């Protein structure tokens, strides 16, 4: 009886700590809503449709930040996704066993480099390189909106490139896990039908499609919230521009830059509202991608069970 | 060209493209390493670790205060995250099927995905705003919150690796659940958990965004918990965006120190886990 109550005590104590973890997430949401309420009330939905950002006049519109965040993240994803998937496929399907561990280690290293180091490298190496690149854009193309603007180096392209480098290890490591979950029978079946390597991998990719989408979305979530590296290379100019070379601004960057300067309460509340929306977006994206990866894992589990049941029948 | 040859060609092209993408990802890694090491080594000397920052215009100086700051902030973070993370991990692995476990697992994944800057805003509202004072405690809180889900996840995964027979043996000898965990299961997984904690520490020591408006920065040497404190990352940021060459050199040196910490910890962790798995398979 004593042992039983001790077991209950153990369960309650450890459960309390675990519950504390869950409460922190709830706490973040509640606190952000509470601290941004002034701005939410004052501007309502207009906050997300207007582009005036004038702390002196107390007029806040966050459209340029949303634009900059989405543009840089989508662009980063376009660059990073093929590379990340290529790496995942190479490591899990193609490369010799002795090469696997070192390659995994190197890609993990890319994820371990602190954001601030990416930013420092971005300022002094990547930005000058992008500036040179822009000066070599042919005259005829400069009239196009996406190539317009003076060659500053800081701007959307630099931010997207740095984000892409940072996102690749995340997407590729999740995609690798997802590919690992594809039953070998899928590949063996394809090979047995005379498929080439590419065709067998395509079959595996098709089987893993929901998980792959999940992996890409996880990378997107990372890109949306990335702060330091982007702040240091994007140019921090609140404007909605289609140009790859225009200095722009992101949600995370404006919080990082202006938070300590926000003297009055409305200004601070407006910045925290941007944080709140960033929190909500990452919550939704992470939730969705986990759901996709999880449903794929469950399907795999089910088909594995079916396969082993089949074996039982055969024996 | 017949169809088979075409398919073979397509296949080889695909394999080539995958291999090429690995190279594409390794180029920035090599470039970053090259610049951080070559630029950092020039500015890194003994003074960097022992002296205070010099004012603009004077060459030299160091980051003694920022190094102490980063150590204190990471220590505080561990103080918060290790108990909550490890005990949550124990709960998740001991009662994996409960509703609370799935909620906590989801919350942990979510918290791990929350942008670090948002964690900073949260810590600001919790620990800076009420006291109208940037402080080491606020910075430690922000880093600790970021560290919790990493520790919880590592602990859960490593505890699940402990063979079920060990748990059953302990329970069969009449141990209570808590005692079985304390004396048999946790010790078996301890080396791995410690490795995981070290890796988590290395990761949060490199964080900048959550510190910008919690621990802020401090030009002076401070060990006070209730005053703003400098950190290597925030100091590197300040130096990097400044217009002075001397400060840029210091920033590269700081980056080299950060990279060394991260790299050192991952290599140590690799070696440790490799050894553990060798012991296991023996």
Image (spheres, coloured by chain):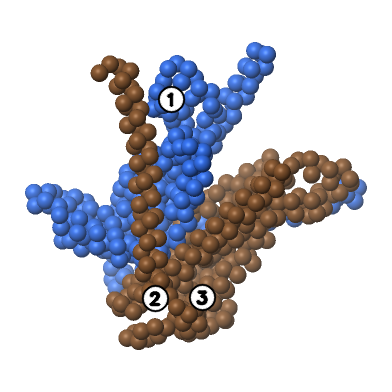
Chain colours: A blue, B brown
- SS label for mark 2: helix
Left or right? Give the position of B40 relative to B68.
left
Quarter residue A298 falls in: top right
Residue depicted at 46% across the width and 39% down the height: A91
Crowding at label 1, few (<14), some or many (≥20) Cα neighbours within 10 Å? many
Disc 1 designates what residue? A200
Disc 3 versus disc 1: nearer the observer: 1
Left or right? Give the position of B161 relative to A190.
right
Note whether residue A175 is visible. Answer: no
Number of the label disc, if any, that sits on residue A302: none
Crowding at label 2, few (<14), some or many (≥20) Cα neighbours within 10 Å? many
Left or right? Give the position of B76 relative to B39.
right
Between A132 and B186, the one lying in front of the other is A132
The quarter of the picture where the N terminus of chain B appears is top left
List x then y, in percent, for residue B221: 51, 84
Query: Which residue sits furthest top?
Result: A314
User: Eyeballing the image, is B215 above or below B159?
Assistant: below
Left or right? Give the position of A49 relative to A98.
left
Label 2, label 1: how many angstroms apart (C-alpha)?
Answer: 52 Å
Residue depicted at 59% across the width and 66% down the height: B77
List x then y, in percent, for residue B281: 69, 42
Q: Do labels 2 and 1 touch, CB within 8 Å? A: no
The quarter of the picture where the C terminus of chain B appears is top right
Q: Do labels 3 and 1 touch, CB within 8 Å? A: no
User: Eyeballing the image, is A8 above or below B63?
Assistant: above
Label 3, label 1: how many angstroms apart (C-alpha)?
Answer: 52 Å
Between B2 and A142, the one lying in front of the other is B2
Number of the label disc, if any, that sits on residue B43: 2
Pointer 2 indicates a residue of which chain? Answer: B
Disc 3 designates what residue? B67
């Amino acid at each position: 009886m004593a042992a039983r109550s001790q077991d209950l005590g153990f369960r309650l104590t450890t459960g309390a700590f675990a519950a504390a973890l869950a409460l922190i997430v709830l706490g973040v949401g509640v606190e952000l809503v509470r601290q941004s309420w002034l701005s939410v009330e004052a501007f309502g939905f207009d906050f997300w449709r207007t582009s005036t950002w004038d702390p002196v006049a107390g007029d806040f519109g966050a459209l340029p930040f949303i634009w900059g965040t989405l543009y840089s993240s989508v662009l980063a994803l376009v660059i990073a996704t093929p590379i990340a998937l290529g790496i995942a496929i190479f490591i899990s399907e193609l490369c010799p066993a002795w090469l696997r561990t070192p390659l995994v280690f190197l890609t993990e290293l890319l994820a371990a480099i602190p954001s601030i180091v990416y930013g420092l490298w971005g300022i002094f190496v990547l930005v000058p390189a992008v500036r040179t690149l822009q000066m070599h854009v042919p005259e005829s193309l400069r009239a196009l909106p996406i190539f317009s603007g003076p060659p500053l180096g800081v701007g959307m392209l630099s931010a997207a490139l740095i984000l892409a480098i940072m996102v690749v290890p995340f997407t590729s490591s999740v995609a690798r896990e997802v590919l690992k979950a594809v039953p070998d029978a899928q590949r063996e079946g394809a090979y047995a039908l005379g498929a080439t390597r590419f065709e067998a991998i395509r079959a595996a990719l098709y089987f893993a499609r929901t998980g792959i989408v999940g992996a890409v979305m996880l990378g997107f979530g990372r890109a949306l919230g990335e702060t330091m590296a982007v702040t240091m290379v994007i140019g921090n100019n609140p404007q909605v521009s289609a140009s790859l070379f225009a200095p722009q601004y992101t949600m995370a960057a404006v919080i990082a830059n202006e938070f300590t300067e926000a003297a009055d309460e409305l200004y601070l509340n407006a910045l925290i509202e941007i944080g709140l929306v960033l929190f909500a977006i990452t919550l939704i994206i992470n939730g969705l991608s986990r759901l996709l990866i999880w449903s794929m894992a469950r399907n795999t589990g089910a088909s594995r069970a079916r396969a082993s049941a089949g074996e039982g029948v055969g024996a | 060209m017949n169809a088979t040859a075409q398919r073979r060609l397509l296949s080889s092209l695909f394999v080539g493209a995958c291999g090429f993408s690995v190279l594409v990802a390794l180029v920035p890694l090599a470039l970053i390493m090259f610049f951080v090491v070559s630029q950092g080594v020039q500015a890194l000397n003994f003074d960097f670790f022992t002296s205070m920052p010099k004012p603009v215009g004077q060459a030299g100086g160091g980051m003694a205060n920022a190094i102490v700051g980063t150590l204190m902030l990471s220590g505080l973070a561990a103080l918060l995250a290790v108990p909550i993370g490890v005990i949550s991990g124990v709960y998740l692995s001991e009662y994996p099927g409960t509703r609370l476990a799935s909620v906590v697992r989801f919350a942990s994944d979510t918290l791990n995905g929350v942008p670090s800057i948002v964690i900073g805003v949260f810590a600001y509202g919790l620990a800076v705003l009420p006291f109208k004072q940037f402080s080491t405690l606020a910075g430690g809180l922000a880093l600790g919150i970021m560290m919790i889900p990493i520790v919880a996840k590592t602990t859960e995964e490593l505890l699940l690796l402990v063979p079920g027979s060990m748990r059953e043996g302990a329970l069969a000898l009449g141990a209570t659940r808590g005692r079985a965990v304390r004396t048999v299961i946790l010790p078996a997984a301890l080396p791995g958990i410690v490795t995981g904690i070290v890796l988590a520490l290395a990761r949060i020591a490199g964080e900048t965004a959550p510190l910008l408006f919690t621990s802020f920065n401090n030009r002076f040497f401070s060990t006070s918990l209730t005053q703003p404190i400098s950190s290597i990352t925030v100091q590197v940021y300040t130096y990097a965006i400044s217009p002075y060459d001397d400060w840029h050199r210091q920033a590269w040196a700081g980056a080299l120190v950060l990279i060394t910490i991260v790299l050192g910890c991952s290599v140590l962790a690799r070696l440790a886990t490799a050894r553990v798995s060798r012991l296991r398979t023996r």
